[in-house]
Amino acid sequence: MAEPGIQAELAWTPEFVCPRCATSLTTFSSQALSCGACQAAVPLRDGIYRFLRPERLAEIEPFLAHYRQVREEDGYRQRDSAYYRSLPMVDARDSQVARWRVRQESFRNLARVLPGLGRRPLRVLDLGAGNGWLSHRLTALGHRCVALDWLDDVEDGLGARRHYPAGFTCVQADFDELPVAPGQFDLAIFNASLHYSPDFARTLCHARAMLVAGGALVVMDSPVFATDQGGRRMLAAQQIGAGARNGSIVRRGVGYLSKSGLARVGRDTGVRIRWIPSRGGPSWAARRWLAGLKERREPARFGVWIGIWPPASS
């Protein structure tokens, strides 16, 4: 529900498929989607379609609890609606202002690319949408967005939808079990999220199947290294840092991407992937360079990887 004084616009709803039998879900109500073939029901609660099974939620809960804690400590979990509506722009005093400047640069680069896709409005699948800031921005530009994530809480997950005036559809689901019919989207964006996949090549293939012919696939703001060695050293440094704080890291996925791995996916699918770097300003670049020097590794690169993807059947 939008806060008082904000009227949410009607969101575009894609064709969903049953998580049990893959039949198209055509029976809608204010509280659930229902499958006419196997009678499975998908709850619609607090404006979010709940496709995650209870057993899957229980499996990933340790990661989600750790993720919430880290995000709280890092200052991402806010409560002011104005904060969410201004993202990716934040106050200069924000504890994560340097990271958000990278997000701003990446969003500007993405926005420059979108007119070249030749469609209006674009139907966008926002994968790893978090608090929905990207879906909010793209919806405000006139596009039709579906925001998908594991996290559903109101401070750093899909529940933050209540802060936005523009309507977009929210789905709690897995990357690798996407509950939407193939071939519906012009654009699929992994929003600082692909590194949470245990097999990013496989996850990219799942997303590719959701695209129309000539659709675009975007990987935005995941940490990317030239080689796996750089990524592994980053993860080791993070674990050491967590140990120094008497903590530990609960990981889901690889934790980074490699330039060679992304290039290999492009070669295997016949797609040339374009890279647009986001540098985040001199101070951000200097801090990352110094951290890399201290840890004897290359600094992670951030930015936008974009490829025009052929349909999965081609």
Image: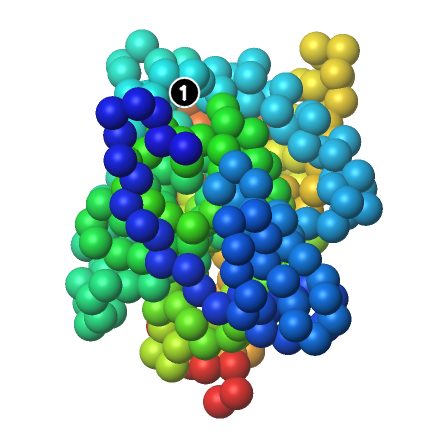
228 relative position to 117: left or right: right
Task: Give the residue number, with chain letter if any, for mark 1.
Answer: 96
User: Which residue is found at the position 25% from the left and 25% from the top?
Assistant: 5
- Quarter-of-image position of residue 105: top left
- Quarter-of-image position of residue 131: top left
- The percent coordinates of residue 113 (x first, y second) are 23, 59
> Tell me, what colour scheme is on the image?
rainbow
306 relative position to 198: left or right: left
The amino acid on which the numbered mark 1 sits, given as a three-letter code, is: Gln
Decide: is 48 above or below 15. Answer: above
Please, which residue is most extreme toward the front here? Answer: 29
- The percent coordinates of residue 266 (x first, y second) are 48, 72
Q: Nearer the viewer, residue 42 or 210?
A: 42
**Can I make out residue 57 in this image?**
yes
Q: Nearer the viewer, residue 223 or 145?
A: 145
Which part of the image, by quadrant, shows the N terminus? top left
User: Which residue is found at the position 50% from the left and 27% from the top?
Assistant: 154
- Quarter-of-image position of residue 39: bottom right
- Secondary structure of the residue carrying tag 1 is loop
Decide: is 212 above or below 113. Answer: below
95 relative position to 232: left or right: left
Q: Nearer the viewer, residue 10 or 296?
A: 10
Decide: is 38 above or below 65. Answer: below
**Can I make out residue 194 in this image?**
no
For disc 1, the neighbor class at 10 Å (few under 14, some 14 to 19, many from 20) is: some
How many dots with numbers? Answer: 1
- The percent coordinates of residue 88 (x first, y second) are 31, 32
- The percent coordinates of residue 70 (x first, y second) are 61, 21
236 relative position to 142: left or right: right
User: Which residue is found at the position 22% from the left and 70% from the top?
Assistant: 119
